[in-house]
């Protein structure tokens, strides 16, 4: 069974998302993120597994054969082979860095990953035209500038080596489903936070279902987080 044999556009979108970004991630987390994007991921993922396009291991992590992964990425690349800034998904670090450094991204970009071994500064204005961006994965990246340019449609923010001790006050992301902040000196989330606590200002983030803060400076969660109706998983590790 191949990608071309899929008849449903949502199933194709789920396949491409996994091929580019979700390999190795927890099945439940991925379903929550994609459901919030309107993709009916529970059904779509079951179809992909049934057709052997995706596998789920004993630890509930998603996997895909390398050939299928490469095929999915080629489907995206071949639409605009010479214009990566117009692709829907950006996973190649060289292309991602070029797009951000030169502000080449446009409204077609829905997902972007940039993972670097050395820290690079990137102007937040590079995200201004990415109004449909729903998934952002960063590592070794320091965003400089006003965070108002980051899309409000973000569903997943994964940021290793988060470079700040608190989140910028303009970073208003009420649609986030999952936040992953690892290996950093973060002690405060949102501008009113204090005393090494995650601030209750995040309570309006009603879509949030997963928070992972590993190897950070956060030491305590306020009780208000227990009142978030959709939150299903919180992991904080010093």
Image: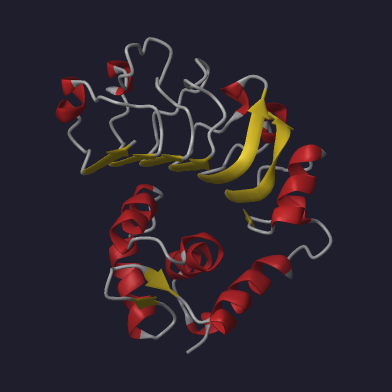
The percent position of residue 225, horizontal first and vertical second, equals: 21, 27
> What residue appears at the point 39 percent right and 54 percent down from the top-left corner?
34
Of 41 and 30, which appears nearest the observer?
A: 30
Determine the image quadrant of residue 123: top right
Of 127 and 232, which appears nearest the observer?
A: 232
**Is 140 displayed left or right of 19 in the figure?**
right
Taking 97 as reference, is 224 above or below it?
Answer: above
**Is 3 displayed left or right of 140 in the figure?**
left
Q: Residue furthest front?
A: 238
**Is 1 displayed left or right of 31 in the figure?**
right
Q: How is the image coloured?
A: secondary structure
> What residue appears at the point 46 percent right and 66 percent down from the top-left corner?
23
Q: Residue furthest bottom?
A: 1
Which quadrant is home to the C terminus?
top left
> What residue appears at the point 56 percent right and 75 percent down from the top-left corner?
69
The percent position of residue 71, horizontal first and vertical second, equals: 62, 78
Of 108 and 56, which appears nearest the observer?
A: 56
Determine the image quadrant of residue 90: bottom right
Residue 109 seen in this snapshot: no
Labels in figure, total:
0
The percent position of residue 50, horizontal first and vertical second, equals: 33, 84
Taking 186 as reference, is 6 above or below it?
Answer: below
Taking 78 as reference, is 115 above or below it?
Answer: above
The percent position of residue 3, horizontal first and vertical second, equals: 53, 80
Residue 166 seen in this snapshot: yes
> What residue appears at the point 29 percent right and 68 percent down from the top-left corner?
60
């Amino acid at each position: 069974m191949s990608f071309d044999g899929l008849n449903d556009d949502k199933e194709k979108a789920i396949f491409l998302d996994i091929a580019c970004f979700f390999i190795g991630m927890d099945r439940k987390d991925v379903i929550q993120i994609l459901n919030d994007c309107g993709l009916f991921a529970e059904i779509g993922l079951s179809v992909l597994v049934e057709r052997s396009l995706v596998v789920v291991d004993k630890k509930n992590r998603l996997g895909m054969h390398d050939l299928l992964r490469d095929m999915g990425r080629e489907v995206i690349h071949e639409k605009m082979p010479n214009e990566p800034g117009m692709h829907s998904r950006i996973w190649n670090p060289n292309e991602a860095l070029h797009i951000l450094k030169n502000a080449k991204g446009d409204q077609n970009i829905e997902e972007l990953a940039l993972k670097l071994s050395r820290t690079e500064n990137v102007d937040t204005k590079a995200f201004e035209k990415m109004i449909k961006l729903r998934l952002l994965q960063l590592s070794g990246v320091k965003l400089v500038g006003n965070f108002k340019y980051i899309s409000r449609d973000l569903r997943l923010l994964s940021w290793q080596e988060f470079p700040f001790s608190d989140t910028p006050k303009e970073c208003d992301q009420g649609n986030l489903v999952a936040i992953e902040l690892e290996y950093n000196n973060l002690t405060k989330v949102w501008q009113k936070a204090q005393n090494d606590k995650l601030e209750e200002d995040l309570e309006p983030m009603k879509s949030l279902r997963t928070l992972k803060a590993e190897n950070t400076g956060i030491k305590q969660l306020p009780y208000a987080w227990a009142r978030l109706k959709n939150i299903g998983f919180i992991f904080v590790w010093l």
